[in-house]
Structure formats: structure tokens, C-alpha cells
Image (cartoon, rainbow, N blue to C red):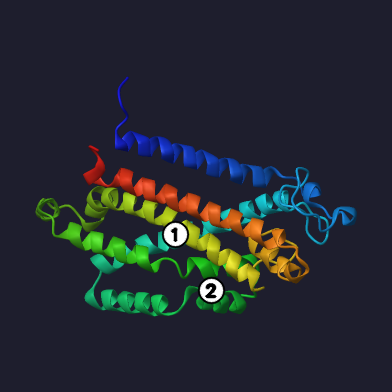
Amino acid sequence: MKKLNRRKKVIIWTVFLVLVFLCLYACGILIPEDVIASDFLDAKHMPSWKHPFGTDALGRDLFFRTLKGLSISITIGMIASAISAVIAILVGISVAVGSKPLDSLINWLIDLVMGIPHTILILLISFALGRGLKGLIIGIASTHWCSLARVIRGEVLQLRSQPYIAISRKLGKSSRWILVHHMLPHLLPQFFVGLILMFPHAILHEAAISFLGFGLPPEQSAIGIILSESMRYLSTGMWWTAVLPGLTLVCIVLLVDKIGEHLRKLIDPYSAQE
């Protein structure tokens, strides 16, 4: 039997991790609201076979509520990350193909955004937009594009110095044609990997802002809301209301980060023959 090389193993692991992620996301979406309804007769129960994560002070099953909250956080993270990644690629291209003043302005803007802690900036944007889902998504999308924009800008500057770009210009090809046919094929792998690696940060910031009360409304089953509610009962010994949902959030973040790391290995040309 032929032994699998390192690249094939990475592909298998990546597919497996993606399937696990999609299953968890689908389960959270498909959970009906009545499953996580309040039941005061079942309140404050420790983890058991009936309730793997226990129940909260209102008798809601924390396992199903955590899965539901993860699906909400993942949806917000995906939307915010996608918007942020699009901003990054547009900015990265514009500063590299535009004028020098534009390049200086964008670099100054990147330094400004990166110089302010993301949590504080998201709080300010969310508060200015009236909190809620809209403010949360705009706040996350407005603060996570900087690192990817710098990577794409550096890639574009490197591509501009390649001989085939100069030959294309001498042959009369327009800047738009060169961008579409020469640059974008090189930038898309960076774009997708950056999008996936940005996603865990978006989830964590969504949970943090909701935890502080500036994100989703309290009636939502988001992870940040669950953790915020659990703080009131930790002193009474209800440790499971914070520990188990928090560990689940950390596991999802590590799972997505591992997927992004594997994709980066697959795209890296130096590992193609491993």
C-alpha cells in the first residue's frame, strides 16, 4: 500500500476539520427554539446525561443553547470577515496601483486603525451606530482588514516588478487587463487564507462585545450573552454555565485556525512536493 505523503495527509485533515465545522454549524442552525425554552423545574442542574452542559438559572439546556449561540456567532463572523477581506483586497490593490499621495494616505489610515485596540474601536463604532447586529458587524468589518491589506499591497508591489508585467505593458495591455489576468490569480490564494484566518478573530470580538453588552440583544443565544449571564451565578457554584460554553468557543476558534493553517500549507508552493 502506497504511503501518503505530507500534502495528502494535510488535505485529508483539512477536509475532516471542515466537515466537523460544517456539522456543528448546521446543528446550531437547525435547533428549534422550543428546545432551548425556559423550564424552571429544570433550573440550575449540573451537567448530566440528560443535559451534557447542565442548565442555566432559567432551566434552559446549555448544550443546545451553546450550539445555537455558536451558529449565531459563526454567521456574524462570516459576514464581518467577508466584508473586511473585500475591503482589504480593494485597499491593497488601490495603494499599489494608485498615486503616491493615495499610498501615503492609506498607510496612515492602516497605522491609525492598527494603533487602536480592536475591542475599543469596535465598542465605539457599535455604540455610535446604536449597538445591535448592524453596529456589531460594521464595527468588526471596519477593524480587521488592515493586516490582510498590507499583505496584499506587498504582494502587488512585488508583482509589479516582474518581467511579464512589463512585457504585457509593452504589448499594449491595459492596467485593468493586467490586474485581472496577472495579479488577481496570485492574490486570490492570499485573500482566501487571510479571510479564514481573520474569521476566528471576528468570532472572539463578537463574543467579547456581546459580553460587554454592546453587541447582540440579551434575548439572543449568542456565546457572549451566555457568558455574560453566567457571571451572575458563578459565586453560587454554577461553574458549568461559564466553563463549558467558554471551552466550546475556544475549541471552535482553534478548529478554524487549524483549517486556515492547513490551507496556507496547501497553497504554499514550497510544500507542493512534500
x and y percentages locating residue 31 in the rendered image: 72, 45
Task: Give the distance between the C-alpha atoms of the residues marked 1 and 2, in whole angstroms.
Answer: 15 Å
Residue 241 sits in quarter:
bottom right
Residue 250 sits in quarter:
bottom right
Q: Secondary structure at mark 1?
A: helix
Q: Is residue 256 above or below residue 96?
A: above
Q: How many C-alpha atoms fall within 10 Å of the one at disc 1: few (<14), some, or many (≥20)?
A: many
Point 32% across, 19% down: residue: 1
Q: Nearer the viewer, residue 172 or 48?
A: 48
Check the image and name the residue furthest to the front: 237
Name the residue that disc number 2 marks. Answer: 122
Point 22% across, 37% down: residue: 273
Tell me if 199 is positioned left or right of 31 in this view.
left
Which amino acid does the dot numbered 2 rest on? Ile
x and y percentages locating residue 74 in the rendered image: 57, 54
Q: How many C-alpha atoms fall within 10 Å of the one at disc 2: few (<14), some, or many (≥20)?
A: many
Q: Secondary structure at mark 2?
A: helix
Point 29% across, 75% down: residue: 102
Visible residue check, residue 74: yes
Name the residue that disc number 1 marks. Answer: 198
Tell me if 46 is positioned left or right of 81 in this view.
right
Q: Is residue 69 above or below residue 207?
A: above
**Count of numbered tags:** 2
Tell me the number on the disc at residue 259. Answer: none
Q: Earlier in the sequence, mark 1 or mark 2?
A: 2
Cβ atoms under marks 1 and 2 closer than 8 Å: no
